[in-house]
Amino acid sequence: MTNKRLPLDQQHQMQERPEEKEMTFLEHLEELRWHIIKAMIAIIAVTIVLFIFQSWLFEVIIFGPTHPDFVSYLAICDFSHAVGLGDTMCFNPPEFRKQAIGFGEAFITSIKVCFVGGFVVAFPIVFREFWSFIRPGLYPNERKATRGVVFVCSSLFLMGVAFGYFIIAPFAINFLVGYTIPGVENSPTLNSFINYMLMFTLPAGLIFELPIVVYFLAKVGLITAQTMRTYRRHSIIGILVLAALITPPDVVTQFLIGIPLYFLYELSIYVAVRVEKSSAD
C-alpha cells in the first residue's frame, strides 16, 4: 500500500534497488574507516618510494621549471620558430639560489613534498576508495549513469595538475623571480618555493573537476544549462577573479589559467545539457 502512494519513478527505483542488509551508523563508520585506511596505505606507500628517490624528485620534478632545458621552455621556443617568430617567444628562467634557512626545513620540506606527491600519484586509488564507500547507496540506474566516474575524475585531476606544472609554473616562476627591487637580491627560501609550486598545481587539479561537479548538481536539479548560459558573462568575471587569486599578479599567467577555465565552463554547460536530455528520456 505504501508503494502505491509514492511517485512512479520512486516506485521504479525501489523495485530496481537490490536487497541489501541495512547497516547501522557504527557499521557505516567502520566501513568508512577501512576505506580511509586503504587510501592512506596507498599514499604512504608512494610517499616512501618518493622519499627514497627524493634526489631525483627534487632535481627533475620540483626544480624542473627552474632549468633552461625544461620541456615547456623548449616547446614554446620550438612553437615560436614554427610560426616564423624566431626567438620572440623563447625565454629561460632566471638563475636563483634556493635557501633552507629554518632549522630542519630541508627535512620537513622533503616529507611534505613526498607526501603531496604521494597523494597526487595515488589519487586514482584514493578516489576509488571514496567512491566505493558512496556507490552502494546508489540505485542501479544511478550506478549506470556514473559508470567510469573514477577514471574521469582521476584523469581530470591529473590533467589539471599537469597543466599547472607545465604551463602555469614556468610563467609564474619567471615573473616572480624576475621581479626585483633595486638593492634587494631575490633569493627565495625552499619553503616558499615549494608552497608556490603547490599553489600552481593542486588548485588547478581541483578546478579541472568542474564538469564532474556540474554533472552531479544537474543530476539533482540544483543547476541547469539555461542557468549557466544566463550567467555566462558573470562567470567570466568570476573566472578572472579566481585566476587572479591562485596565480601571481601577472596578466599573462592569469589568462593562461583563465582561458582553460572558460572552456571548462562551456564544457560544463554541455554536460548539463546531456544530463537534462537523459533525465527527460
Image: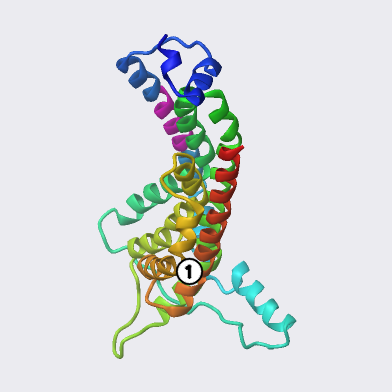
Could you tell me which residue is drawn at 43 percent across and 20 percent down?
A: 6
For the question of whether residue 26 can be seen, the reply is yes
Along the viewing direction, whichever of 188 and 134 lies nearer the viewer = 134
Could you tell me which residue is drawn at 29 percent across and 53 percent down?
A: 104
In magenta, the rendered stretch is 34-45
- Crowding around mark 1 (Cα neighbors within 10 Å: few <14, some 14 to 19, many 20+) is many
Residue 75 percent location from the top left of the image: 66, 72
In the structure shown, which secondary structural element does the residue marked by tag 1 occupy? helix
Residue 245 percent location from the top left of the image: 35, 67
Residue 146 percent location from the top left of the image: 56, 35
Residue at the farthest bottom position: 182
- Toward which corner of the image does residue 220 lie, by quadrant? top left
Could you tell me which residue is drawn at 35 percent across and 79 percent down?
A: 186
For the question of whether residue 51 can be seen, the reply is no
Residue 159 percent location from the top left of the image: 57, 54
Residue at the farthest left position: 103
- Toward which corner of the image does residue 89 lie, by quadrant? bottom right
- Toward which corner of the image does residue 16 lie, by quadrant? top right
Question: Residue 37: within the magenta?
Answer: yes
Residue pointed to by mark 1: 258
Asked if residue 280 lies left or right of residue 219, the reply is right
Asked if residue 194 lies left or right of residue 94, the reply is left
Residue kind at label 1, given as amino acid type: Gly
The answer to whether residue 41 is above or below residue 63 is above
Along the viewing direction, whichever of 130 and 190 lies nearer the viewer = 130
Along the viewing direction, whichever of 126 and 211 lies nearer the viewer = 211
Along the viewing direction, whichever of 65 and 127 lies nearer the viewer = 127
Question: Residue 189: within the magenta?
Answer: no
- Name the quadrant of the N terminus: top left
- Name the quadrant of the C terminus: top right
